[in-house]
Image (spheres, rainbow, N blue to C red):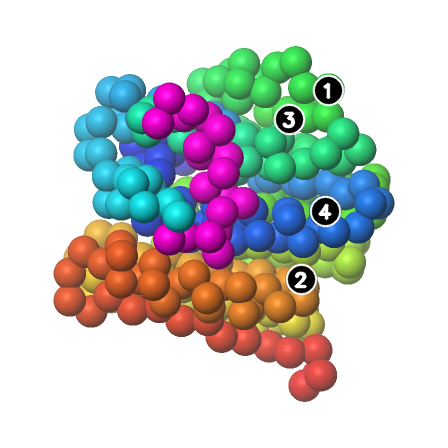
Amino acid sequence: MLSYRHAFHAGNHADVLKHAVQALILESLKKKEKPFIVLDTHAGGGLYDLRGEWAQKKAEFADGIGRLWDEQARWSSIDPYLAIVRAMNDDGTLTYYPGSPELSRRLTRAQDKVVLMELHNNEVESLRGNMQGDERVTVHHRDGFEGLVALLPPTPRRGLVLVDPPYELKEDYFRVVETLKKAQKRWATGIYTIWYPILGREADRSRDMLSAIAKAGLGDVLVAELEVAGQTPDWGMNGSGMVIVSPPWLLDKQIEAFLKPLCAKLAQGPGAQYRVEWLSRREAQ
C-alpha cells in the first residue's frame, strides 16, 4: 500500500493534465481578494528532480512536459501552470518539476493556506523538507482519505481539494467516492478535484467510479479525460482523467480549449482521444 513513489512518473502526460487543471482553478479562486485554502490528500514529495534515478528510469516526462517545453508560447491557455515550471527552471533547461504541493504553494497568495497530507514515511519527509520555511503550508503525516474528512470544514471557507491516490488497491476507487460524499456533506461550498488513471480494459475500474460519482447527488460534476493511445487488454496506463465537483464558471470551456491540441501533441499511438463532459448538473436534480 505504501510502495508508490510519484517520482517515477513526474511530468508525464497525466501530470500535465492534472496540473494544468489545478492551476486554472487556483487562478479562478484568486479573482476574489478573500483568502482560500488548498487541501491535498496524497501530496507526495512536493517537487521532483528530473535528473534523479527514479525520474530517469522511464523518463516519462519526455513524453509529457518535455513535449511542451520548447514551444511554450503556443500554450498560452495553460500558462499559469507552465509559468511555474519556467520559474523553477530559469536557466532554460528542464530539470525540476513541481508536484501539486509546489504548484499550490507558488500559485497561492500571502492570505491563503495550503494543507498537505501524505502517508508514506519517506515521501512525507521529502515533503516537509521541500515545503519548509513557508508558514502558510501545513504538512500532515496521515491517511489522506481519513484526514480530509477530519479537517472539514476548513478555515477559510473558500477553497480547493485535490484527491490523487495511487490506486494501487482496488479499494481506492471505492474510498474516493465515499470520501467525496462525506466531505461534501461537511463542506458543500468547496471545489473538489479527483485524478484517476485510465488503464487497460481488463483493469480499468475508473468507469465504475465515475458511474458512482454521477449518481451521488453532488451537483455540478465535470469530467476531463486524456488518452494518449488506444486501450489495450493489459494493465498499462494509456490515459487519465480529472473529476471536478463544483467547478468554477467557464472551467469546462478553458479545459476544452487546451485539451484538443494537447491530445494531438501528447499522442503516443493510434486511438489517442479526449473528452470534456458533464457527469451531472445541479439543474437536473
* Residue extending furthest toward the bottom: 284
Of the 4 image quadrants, the one containing the N terminus is: top left
User: Given the image, on which type of amino acid does mark 4 rest?
Assistant: Lys
**Residue under numbered circle 4:** 30
Residue 24: x and y in percent read: 57, 52
Residues at marks 1 and 4, CA–CA distance in whole angstroms: 19 Å
Image disc number at residue 140: 3
**Residue under numbered circle 2:** 248
- Give the mark toward the camera: 3 or 2: 2
Find out whether residue 86 is within the magenta segment.
Answer: yes
Please report the residue visible at 45 percent of the width from the left and 18 percent of the height from the top: 122
Q: Quadrant of residue 58?
A: top left
Of the 4 image quadrants, the one containing the C terminus is: bottom right
**Residue under numbered circle 1:** 135
Report the magenta residues as a range: 74-92
Q: Quadrant of residue 248?
A: bottom right
User: Is 102 situated left or right of 91 in this image?
Assistant: right
Q: Is residue 214 above or below residue 184?
A: below
Q: Is residue 107 above or below residue 149?
A: above
Please report the residue visible at 35 percent of the width from the left and 27 percent of the height from the top: 92
Residues at marks 1 and 2, CA–CA distance in whole angstroms: 27 Å
User: Given the image, on which type of amino acid does mark 1 rest?
Assistant: Glu
User: Judging from the image, what secondary structure is the residue with disc 3 in?
Assistant: strand
User: Judging from the image, what secondary structure is the residue with disc 4 in?
Assistant: loop
